[in-house]
Amino acid sequence: RSKARLYYESAVPHLELSGAQRKSLRAQYNALALFSRDTPDEKRLIPQLHALCKRARDLNDGGVQGLVCQSLSWEFQRIGALIIAERYAQLAVEALTPESGSINFYRALAHRAALLWQMKRFPEAELDLEHCSISTFPEIRQFVQAVRTKTPPATVGTSSLGAWNERL
């Protein structure tokens, strides 16, 4: 286990006790995201992500809800449930729209574009790619280049966007 994951997991009960529900939620999401990164093929996290999504909705935390929906989308995409994955990708973009211009918003758009591309829904994917192309974040610009050329730069596969080589 990574040290960061241990810190997030240990912070959750302390944050709960102090009444910092949204911070606790974020710590839970970060711990789960690190678990997924540490053990990418060990376990599907759909039930845990569903529980976090419900909690984020209950706490009216659109930022975490968007991140969790994006993670759910990726999990469903990995098992081939593309229609369900597309629904969660849409929910992620909607939840993160108030943060338009943030890296998380662009990551959600990029993920949805890649998913739509995989589903051969090219006009819809192109709309998201156009939106992504105005981003100033290097990883998003690299993603747009990777999708349009179908030859991902080496750095894209190791970025926080995930393994784009797998997705293209």
Image: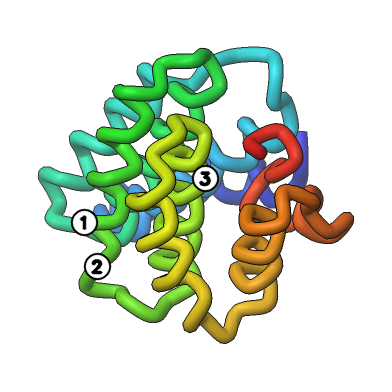
Query: Closer to the camera: disc 3 or disc 1?
Result: 3
* Quadrant that contains the C terminus: top right
Does the rendering let one see residue 28?
A: no
In the picture, residue 126 is in which quadrant? bottom left
On screen, 3 above or below 129? above
CA gap between label 3 and label 1 equals 17 Å
CA gap between label 2 and label 3 equals 18 Å
Of labels 3 and 1, earlier in sequence is: 1
In the picture, residue 121 is in which quadrant? top left
- Specify the label residue 86 is tagged with: none
Where disc 1 sits, the SS reads helix
Position in image of residue 167 (x %, y %): 63, 36
Position in image of residue 166 (x %, y %): 71, 33
- The type of residue carrying mark 1 is Glu
CA gap between label 1 and label 2 equals 5 Å
Residue farthest along the right direction in this orientation = 154
Residues marked 1 and 2 touching at CB (< 8 Å): yes
Q: Which residue is mark 1?
A: 94
On screen, 141 above or below 68? below
Q: Which residue is mark 3?
A: 114
- Specify the label residue 97 is tagged with: 2
Near mark 2 (Cα within 10 A), the count class, few <14, some 14-19 or many ≥20, is some
* Quadrant that contains the N terminus: top right
